[in-house]
Image: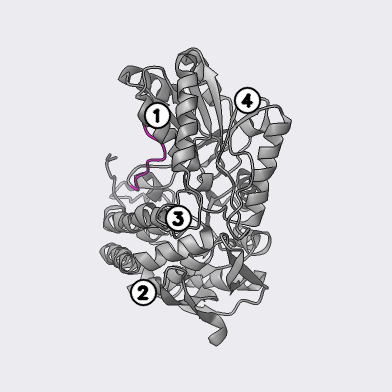
Amino acid sequence: MADLFVNLTTPNGHSYIQPRGLFINNEFVKGSGETISTLDPATEIEITSVHAASVDDVDRAVRAAKAALKAPSWKKLPATARGRLLVRLSELIEEKKELFASIEAWDNGKTYGLAMEDDLPDSIGTFRYYGGWADKNFGQTIETTPETMAAWKLGPALACGNTVVLKAAEQTPLSVLLLATLIRDAGFPPGVVNIINGYGREAGASLVQHPLVDKVAFTGSTTTGAQIMKSASASLKDITLETGGKSPLLIFEDADLDQAVKWSHAGIMSNQGQICTATSRIFVQRSIYDQFLSLFKERVRTASIIGNQWSETTFQGPQVTRAQYDRVLHYINLGKQEGATVETGGEAFQSPDGKGFFVQPTTFTNVTPSMQIYRDEIFGPVAVIVPFDTEEDAIEYANDTLYGLGAAVFTMNLRRGHRVAAEIEAGTVWLNSSQDSDHRVPFGGYKASGVGRELGQAGLEAYTQIKAVHVNMGNDL
């Protein structure tokens, strides 16, 4: 058993027992695959390693979930009781929110403040929200009414009475494994939630292709999403995909310029640009373009403080892995080679000890639509700023992308805001903000940004099946 747990102390002083194994049938067990090392991206020092699942381990987890689906302890559990379990889980997470935020910062690289202020409230709120839905979504017509990735998927799936096998991201598995201990403590029956670690090429592929899996939900790259869609199609599995984005942010000449600068900076530079909806293409009406550019550069200079994830003054931490760090720098170099002008950043950032996957917040101008920095999702702190003349031009530029996950529009003209939002091909459009989210509001993408919706009532529909039962009440032949 000693191999399944390790005593750790986070850099900000939280001592705890970290699970390392696979969570199957409410127990941590060894994996028969290789181990996966997880690093602190600010120091490049190993935090620990976790067991990876083999094909046989995936099969064991899926069969445990299938058995739990039919077991009376879950199948016969009243919907109200399911809801109470989800609410209890949210309470347990809240009791340990500082620890969860610390783990997220440690192996992910996001700032501790961001994890505490954004991620944990989102996760807690999502479980509570779907706990409230659990006894309101059964065999009736419901009127339409007006950590985090796991909550988005577990919450609605469990509220609807499903069982789950969750594969943790191979780069950041620690917080999800800790969540497993709370799932057991909350009182969920064995097999209802199973959590495995593993590489996508083995554990992920086996999970998607498993004949007993009825539904696949995935958040990640468009390339991987397309592979999952292809694999799932062989057995006609239901899928929900939240994939890539290259979101536009439009600033019209009547916008509150000070607010537009602050929101556009946060929309691409927060969390090191590692946000699926990051508004990385900034389009500014030509009459205010020079003024905006000057203010944006100043905002980057004063607000994008780079440092380790524990400092209260840090705005931007390290990229999550060396591979992502190398990818971001590759695109920055491509931008230079393609002839774009570097306005801010453009290089790696050297920490005092020379360690860590830090990248300077980078802004390009003189960018054309054919450039890769304009078209490709970089998933890093890299923005392009492009002028436009008319509303029609802005809409055309915004929609000139394979993606359609998010978009932002800045204008004080409410009619224009609604008019432009209606024309933009994106699942979410923000008016005078960027990156707002709420677990009560559906989230998903157009085009290559995904299939289906998560969150809100729409998130429940992804985890249910409609059945029609015809009863002959006396129509004899």
Closest to the observer, 469 or 434: 434
The residue carrying mark 4 is: 367
x and y percentages locating residue 420 in the rendered image: 42, 21
x and y percentages locating residue 225 in the rendered image: 60, 47
Q: How is the image coloured?
A: one colour
- The reply to whether the C-beta atoms of the residues labelled 4 and 2 are less than 8 Å apart is no
Could you tell which of marks 3 and 2 lies nearer the N-terminus?
A: 2
Tag 4: Cα neighbours inside 10 Å, few (<14), some, or many (≥20)? some
x and y percentages locating residue 221 in the rendered image: 60, 47
- The circle on residue 73 is 2
Tag 1: Cα neighbours inside 10 Å, few (<14), some, or many (≥20)? many
x and y percentages locating residue 326 in the rendered image: 68, 49
Q: Which residues are magenta?
A: 431-439
The residue carrying mark 1 is: 260
- Estimate the spatial distance between the alpha carbons at disc 3 and disc 2, rounded to whole Å: 40 Å
Q: Amino acid at mark 1?
A: Ala
Could you tell which of marks 1 and 3 lies nearer the N-terminus?
A: 3
The residue carrying mark 3 is: 111
Q: Quadrant of residue 341?
A: top right
Q: Amino acid at mark 3?
A: Thr
Q: Nearer the viewer, mark 3 or mark 2?
A: 3
Could you tell which of marks 2 and 1 lies nearer the N-terminus?
A: 2
Q: Quadrant of residue 126?
A: bottom left
Q: Amino acid at mark 2?
A: Ser
Q: Secondary structure at mark 3?
A: loop
Q: Amino acid at mark 4?
A: Val
- Estimate the spatial distance between the alpha carbons at disc 2 and disc 1, rounded to whole Å: 53 Å
Could you tell which of marks 1 and 4 lies nearer the N-terminus?
A: 1
